[in-house]
Image (cartoon, rainbow, N blue to C red):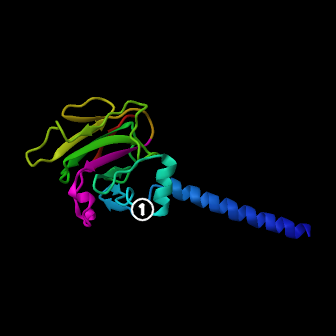
């Protein structure tokens, strides 16, 4: 009798604990069922729509974030550079290349574990499409570093990993079915402070 009770208790503990652990992992993981990758950038085009998968909806609720609707815009996230290394706040990066058509876009630094929210407590400021210096072919080169640099500069503060958030507002790519075919800028590591 006692043996059966212990087996039932062990089974319930494994079932409930395993279920809770797998749900916590699924809600905390960056990947989602509706993920689209473009180079090193990742987008979740269904996040602000009723068609979002249940895990994305739960993640949005848990983080209390407000994703953009499909007609409003589309954010892209990069947590790795072009060579596949994790982005770190103590390194200098160069974000360069063409940007897809959009009425307005922003580039911000976010905490690695809170992708929907830009960092506000360490005073990181983003850059936007207005007032940037552009190349002759309309390409843009932005330096992301702690120290100011000439040209377009994205200030980075704090320590640890980071994620770049590139958000396009009022853009045709948000409703386009061929999002994976667009070209986004590369994130190149210039150097790291030891």
Q: Quadrant of the N terminus?
A: bottom right
Q: Is residue 181 above or below residue 29?
A: below
Q: Is residue 152 above or below residue 41?
A: above
**Residue 18: percent from left, percent from top:** 65, 62
- Residue 182, given in percent of the width and then of the height, sits at 22, 60
The C terminus - image quarter = top left
According to the picture, the residue beneath numbered tag 1 turns out to be 52
At a point 40% along the width and 34% down the height, the residue shown is 120
The quadrant where residue 33 appears: bottom left
**Range shown magenta:** 161-186
Which residue is at 18% across, 34% downward?
151
Report the number of numbered marks: 1
Query: Foreground residue, 117 or 158?
Result: 117
In front of the other: 53 or 139: 53
In the rendered image, the vertical position of residue 17 relative to residue 95, given as above or below: below
Find the residue positioned furthest to the right.
1
Q: How far across and down, in percent of the image, does residue 48 sit?
A: 38, 56
Look at the numbered disc 1 and give the secondary structure of its residue: loop
Q: Is residue 171 magenta?
A: yes
Instruction: Find residue 158 and report its horizontal and vertical position in percent.
Output: 42, 33
Q: Which quadrant holds residue 43? A: bottom left
Is residue 162 on the magenta stretch?
A: yes
Answer with left or right where residue 1 lies relative to residue 8: right
Q: Residue at x 24, y 40 (%)?
A: 128
Q: Residue at x 71, y 63 (%)?
A: 14
Q: Residues within 10 Å of mark 1 (few under 14, many from 20)?
A: some
């Amino acid at each position: 009798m006692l043996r059966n009770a212990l087996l039932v208790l062990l089974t319930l503990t494994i079932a409930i604990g395993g279920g809770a652990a797998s749900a916590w992992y699924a809600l905390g993981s960056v990947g989602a069922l509706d993920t689209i990758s473009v180079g090193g950038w990742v987008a979740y085009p269904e996040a602000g729509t009723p068609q979002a998968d249940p895990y994305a909806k739960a993640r949005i609720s848990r983080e209390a974030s407000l994703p953009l609707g499909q007609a409003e815009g589309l954010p892209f996230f990069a947590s790795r550079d072009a060579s596949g290394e994790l982005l770190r706040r103590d390194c200098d990066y160069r974000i360069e290349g063409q940007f897809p058509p959009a009425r307005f876009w922003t580039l911000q630094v976010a905490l690695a574990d809170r992708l929907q929210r830009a960092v506000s407590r360490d005073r990181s400021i983003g850059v936007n499409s207005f007032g940037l210096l552009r190349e002759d072919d309309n390409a843009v080169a932005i330096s992301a570093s702690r120290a100011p640099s000439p040209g377009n500069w994205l200030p980075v503060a704090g320590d640890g990993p980071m994620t770049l958030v590139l958000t396009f507002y009022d853009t045709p790519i948000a409703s386009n079915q061929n999002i994976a075919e667009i070209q986004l800028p590369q994130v190149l590591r210039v150097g790291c402070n030891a």
